Amino acid sequence: MGAEFEILAFTWAGLIAFAVLVYVILDGFDLGLGILFPFGGSHRNRDVMMNSVAPVWDGNETWLILGGGGLFAVFPLAYAVVMPALYMPILLMLLGLVFRGVAFEYRWRTVRWRGVWDAAFFGGSVIAALCQGIALGALVQGIEVEGRAYAGGWFDWLTPFSAMTGLAVLTGYALLGATWLVMKTEGPLNARMRGFAWPLGLATVGFVGLVSLWTPFLEGAYFERWFSLPFSVFTVLVPLLVAGLAALFVHGLRSGHDRTPFLAALGLFVVAYAGIGVSFYPMMVPPDITIWQAAAPESSLWFALVGAAILIPIILAYTAYAYWVFRGKIDPEEGYH
């Protein structure tokens, strides 16, 4: 294994981690908005909620495709192990995203069946968020591998820890959705979502603490990594960063700032994601498959990297442009329909 191969594999692991993080950040508030959909208070408010993400919602999922496609292309062993291990939650997640997309388009075309499509939008959002959290928890707790193949059972993905992470992601996404609407709306809907943000913020911080306490005891490697140098420095930083972001979140809500709560909520996700990264490294599929064991041949890594070097800046540019064009508060009188 040469140094060039190791650098390439590490670079690709970073790119996929980046794509997944961007997806979580961007599609998180989109899914969270769907989770809060029944609590909008009126059909008009729900229209405004949906219109707040109408210009960007489908582009957000580009990053999910990039992460999944990248995993298949450059870490085929990891893909071959993870997919059968997490087949059910991943399948349900995709079905949830399909229901969301269909409901997004069809609820504007009918009055009689609007309640059905509202329910589909809510249900798809809840299922997608919950299954993403369950899949994450199942991956963190480790996947049983024998002879480069998944060796576990059909329901190994469903454990108390994965159920807890499912609820954590569901709650965190709802927080992102609430704070996004605080940032994008005015009047009664803004006040309503500001009220939801308080308990959701408290619950999200509680889940971050619970996951942080539970994770080191899942695997001996996690415990050693969290409590030995240099990673133990991050162990000290995590509670400090979470406390600082929680204080910023509270200040933003109390002072009436509309952007600060959303940025603080995003910060909580970034810190939690970085904590998972510290636990994982250098594993691609814990506890047995490393980044370099899972990587494709060097020629494949180079070939895919050329494509990524062209596509990722383009995706970043059009994503940034879309958010820039549709920045600011949403006008309730203008809509997707």
Image: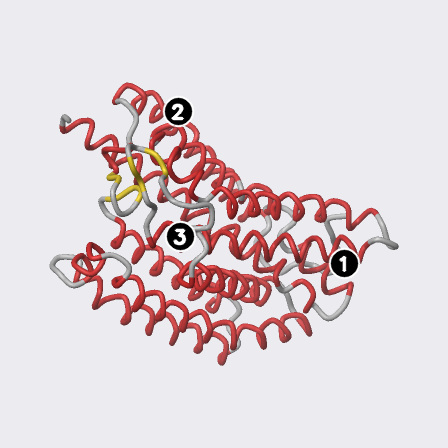
- Residue 45 position in % (x across, y down): 72, 65
Between the residue at mark 2 and the residue at mark 3, the CA separation in whole angstroms equals: 31 Å
Indicate the quadrant where residue 333 lies: bottom right
For label 2, the residue is 307
For label 1, the residue is 333
- First reached walking from the N terminus: tag 1 or tag 2: 2
**Judging from the image, what secondary structure is the residue with disc 2 in?**
helix
- Residue 112 position in % (x across, y down): 88, 54
Q: Residue at x 30, y 26 (%)?
A: 296
The amino acid on which the numbered mark 2 sits, given as a three-letter code, is Gly
- The one nearer the camera, 248 or 222, is 222
Q: Are marks 1 and 2 in contact (CB under 8 Å)?
A: no
- Residue 194 position in % (x across, y down): 57, 74
- Residue 207 position in % (x across, y down): 41, 69
Q: Are marks 2 and 3 in contact (CB under 8 Å)?
A: no
Number of numbered discs visible in the structure rendering: 3
- The one nearer the camera, 23 or 69, is 69
Relative to 194, does residue 290 appear above or below in the rendering? Answer: above
For label 3, the residue is 138
